[in-house]
Image (cartoon, helix red, strand yellow):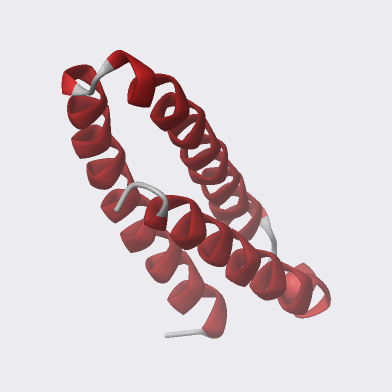
Amino acid sequence: MSKKDELVHEIKAQIDEWSAEIEILEKQIEKAKPDIKVKQEEQLSLLRNKYYEAKQKLLDVQSSSEEAWDDIKEGIEDSWKSIQSAFSKALLRFK
């Protein structure tokens, strides 16, 4: 499996996991007290933004040719790590 294919697989798996986590959080927020609900909805919005960034990165990786991949892989990988870190930090605010 090429490095590009590995990254596509990793991003897809992470997106699926995040989607499930977002669904769980949405259900928790529905049951939250009004004073907590507003803050949690803000955090959920941040999580959704990172989720959509990850989906865009997946499209970027999938649409890149093998030749272009060599030129963009470092930037894509750095960006992906940044998205993962930001999502994890935002998720911790729920715990």
26 to 43, vertically: above or below: above
Q: Specify the quadrant that holds the N terminus.
A: bottom left
| Residue 57 horizontal side relative to residue 84, left or right | right
How far across and how far down the image is residue 72, in percent? 79, 71
Numbered circles on residues, count? 0
Residue 54 location (% of width, % of height): 54, 50
Q: Is residue 53 above or below residue 92?
A: above
Direction from residue 59 to residue 7 in the image, left or right: left
Residue drawn 75% across and 79% down?
74
Q: Residue at x 48, y 41 (%)?
A: 47
Foreground: 46 or 83?
Answer: 46
Q: Residue at x 54, y 84 (%)?
A: 3
Across and down, in percent, residue 2 comes to 50, 84
Left or right for 52, reference 91 = right
User: Which of the 4 image quadrants contains residue 31?
Assistant: top left
| In the image, residue 18 above or below residue 35 | below
Q: Residue furthest top?
A: 34
Give percent across and percent down for residue 17: 27, 54
| Image position of 80 (left or right of 2) | right
The residue positioned 35% from the left and 26% from the top of the image is 36
Q: Nearer the viewer, residue 21 or 8?
A: 21
Residue closer to the observer: 6 or 38: 38
Nearest to the observer: residue 31 or residue 54? 31
Question: Which image quadrant is residue 83 in?
Answer: bottom right
Name the residue at the front extreme: 35
Name of the residue lying farthest toward the right: 71
